[in-house]
Image: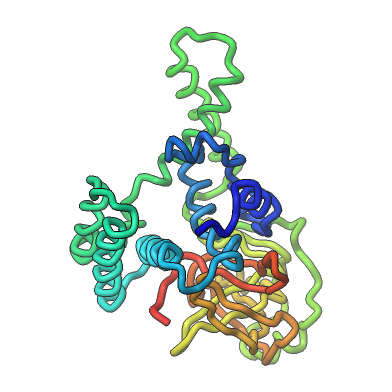
Amino acid sequence: MKYFDLDTLNSRKEFFDYGPKEIENISPKIQLHHLKKKKLKMSAREMMTFIMYFPVMIGDLVPSDDVVWKFLINFVEIIDILLCFEIDECNILILENKIKTHNSDYITLFNDTLKLKFHNLTHYPNIIRQSGPLRKIWCFNFEQKHKQFKVYSHCITSRKNIYLTLAKKYELKFAFQLLKGTSFFNAITSNDNHLVESNFKNLINNKLPNVHDVSIQFYSRIYFKGVEYRQGCYISVFNKNILLNLIHEIVVVERKHVLFFCQHLYSVKFDDHILAYEVDPLNLGSFSMIAADEIIGPPIHLIRTAEGKKVIRIKEYYRCI
């Protein structure tokens, strides 16, 4: 049964609320010939963003009892588990079961044989047990450099020994980073232009009684271990359940420690149809200080769906609900 057409999908994809970070990874418009060839024209990063948000984009158009939709949700959950930085034995067992379900449902629903990649999936749980999360051994970070080199190659008019030219350009860029004095091992990267006055200074001082005022700085934006955090974003922590928090202030203590002055979201309900938490951003609870190391995954933003719901899709984390 047809629930939406290609124009609807492209429209939803184009006007979807990706947030300040994922807006850089929007995939191009899907054409009819892409579907006929069964091959979408997307980079790996664009595909990751598309798959992660696809249930939220068009979930309201598909009934919850649709078997193909259930197959898709199971597949997205497999990806969620595989992209985690930490995976316990419980989630590995869940992963094994979901992969088994995925392969059997694929044969039943699409009347097709399994390909090599489907077989490779069955080995992932044991590889994770032996070598840890796959995300820590993937080559994705190296492939990110492809885009930079493609831009360089289009700007170069000479085609004589282009490999040497690209290598020199990369060496110059690396040398520039060294001359700037930016250490690759600094966990905290900040800019003085993002220094701000605190609106909650008294509350923060009460929560940090043993810290002197002169050693505290407040930022609207900061990088911690390569991840950007901003005021107004949401972060998640786990304490017997998922807790979502709105960042009000970013606090740096003695240039060593990053803390987030946050307010807890009260009304949070997980919607397993779209794999996202439906929230009320105005229903806020108590204030708290959260250390950067306590956070699960990267910062996330509030998504407004096509039907008017406000939801949050957690990244790089999975827990069976």
Toward which corner of the image does residue 316 lie, by quadrant?
bottom left
Residue 118, x across and y down, in percent: 26, 52
Q: Is residue 77 above or below residue 30?
A: below
Instruction: Please count the marks in the image.
Output: 0
Residue at the outermost front position: 1
Horizontal side, residue 278 vs residue 104: left or right: right
Horizontal side, residue 52 vs residue 10: left or right: left
| Display colour scheme | rainbow
Viewer can see residue 80: no
Residue 233, x across and y down, in percent: 66, 69
- Residue at the spot x=31%, y=57% of the render? 106
Toward which corner of the image does residue 305 lie, by quadrant?
bottom right
Residue 7, x across and y down, in percent: 65, 47
Image quarter in which the C terminus is found? bottom left
Toward which corner of the image does residue 224 lie, by quadrant?
bottom right
- Residue at the spot x=23%, y=64% of the render? 125
Residue 235, x across and y down, in percent: 58, 73
- Residue at the spot x=47%, y=33% of the render? 146
- Residue at the spot x=29%, y=74% of the render? 94
Horizontal side, residue 282 vs residue 1: left or right: right
Viewer can see residue 72: yes
